[in-house]
Amino acid sequence: MLAQDYFDVCLRVLERIRDEQMDKVQEAARIIAEAIAGGNSFFAFGCTHSSLPIQEVFYRAGGFMLINPIFAPGLTLDVRPPTMTSRLERLDGYGRLIFENVPAREGDVLLLISVSGRNAVPLEVALEAKRRGMKLVVITALEYTQNVESRHASGKKVYELADLVLDNYSPRGDAVLELEGLPQKTGSTSGVAASCMMHAIVSQVVENLMAEGITPPVYMSGNLDGGAEYNERMLAKYKDRIFYT
């Protein structure tokens, strides 16, 4: 049964990430925690489905308040028709325009998710981040991105610009399950893998900050008594590094 197969594949991918990428997860957390401890800010970006793992850790119970997601017009899945998002992600110049409105500076960190790493918008966002002197952490699929051509004039792909690359182990084309008579595979693993990696990185950032004597702002569930009031206090305290309220 493909349902069972999907769980099995996802478990194998997550175990492989745990066993082979944990040093990269720890390093990503170290880079982010050091930036936060030094008074800098943390941003995250992804187009369409690559934005979903960022949304997964953003503005939620247990979520780190200092994640500043970059959500660009036309690159989230509420766009109709959704086919427009694919065309916009390939649009030269749009990534630079997006980043013009990001209040990032030297010493800040950008975590960028791009499975194929080949399209113009994530590539231009990465280039702009490096131009401003930011640290760039990338979650991508190395087997995928190394076997496709760049769609940007530079000829580069996102992972080539990164200070740190984490591999989500998704295959070329992303989908993993085959069914006789069906010409296309089904069952993508990139979202599950990246979401788990994001939660792991954020959790490690929180632990690292606590080890430095810094109590990090973490969202409390608004459905717990006192949760909303606590969140309001923390948002006010860290308003200089929170750009989404």
Image (cartoon, rainbow, N blue to C red):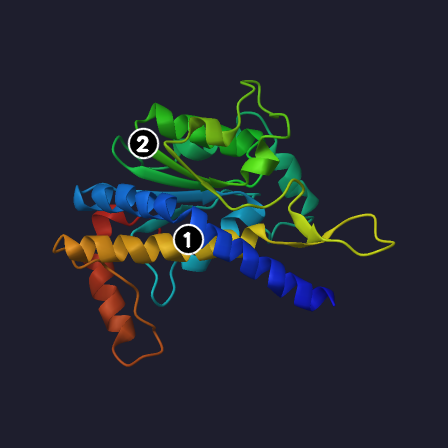
| Amino acid at dot 1 | Met
Read off the residue under disc 2. 134
Toward which corner of the image does residue 227 lie, by quadrant? bottom left
Residue 89 at least partly seen: no
Considering depth in this image, is 187 or 59 the residue closer to the camera? 187
| Amino acid at dot 2 | Met
Measured as percent of width and height from the top left, residue 125 is found at 45, 32
Measured as percent of width and height from the top left, residue 66 is found at 29, 52
Toward which corner of the image does residue 31 lie, by quadrant? top left
Helix, strand or loop at mark 1: helix
Residue 214 horizontal side relative to residue 188, left or right: left
Image quadrant occupied by the C terminus = bottom left
Which mark identifies residue 198?
1
Measured as percent of width and height from the top left, residue 238 is found at 21, 53
> Callout 1: few (<14), some (14-19), or many (20+) C-alpha neighbours within 10 Å?
many
Choose the circle earlier in sequence order: 2 or 1.
2
